[in-house]
Image: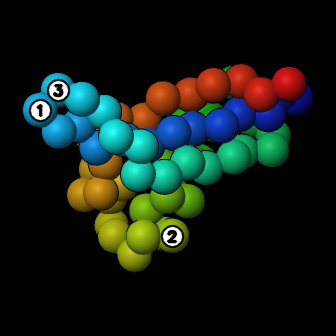
Amino acid sequence: MPNYRIDFAKEILGVPFTVGSVAIARARDPERARRAAEIRFARQHGVGDWRERADLATVAERL
């Protein structure tokens, strides 16, 4: 199974600024990795929904 890195960014005046990232060691596909990272990011920041801290989530497959 591939590894993924999901970067979370806050967009200010149209420019994305990375506010955090989460590495997912094993996921069947990028969508599952993104969902797992969203949950982990929210828990790390003590919020109910990841969108309270970030506007964007981008997935990158790691080798």
How far apart are the two marked residues, 3 and 1, measured between alpha carbons? 4 Å
The front one of 13 and 1 is 13
**Label 1: which secondary element:** loop
Q: What number is the disc on residue 56?
A: none
Mark 1: give few (<14), some (14-19) or many (20+) Cα within 10 Å.
few
Amino acid type for the residue under numbered disc 1 = Leu
Considering every residue shown, the one lying at the far bottom of the view is 46
Considering every residue shown, the one lying at the far left of the view is 13
Mark 3: give few (<14), some (14-19) or many (20+) Cα within 10 Å.
few
Q: Is residue 14 above or below residue 32?
A: above
The picture places residue 41, in percent across and down from the top left corner, at: 49, 58
How far apart are the two marked residues, 1 and 2, measured between alpha carbons? 26 Å
Q: Which residue is mark 3?
A: 14
The front one of 47 and 5 is 5
The picture places residue 24, in percent across and down from the top left corner, at: 72, 45
Q: Which residue is mark 2?
A: 44
Name the image colouring.
rainbow
The answer to whether residue 28 of the structure is visible from this angle is no
Seen at 63% across and 25% down, the residue is 60
Q: What number is the disc on residue 13?
A: 1
How far apart are the two marked residues, 3 and 2, measured between alpha carbons? 26 Å
Q: Classify residue 50 as left or right of residue 12.
A: right
Front: mark 1 or 2: 1
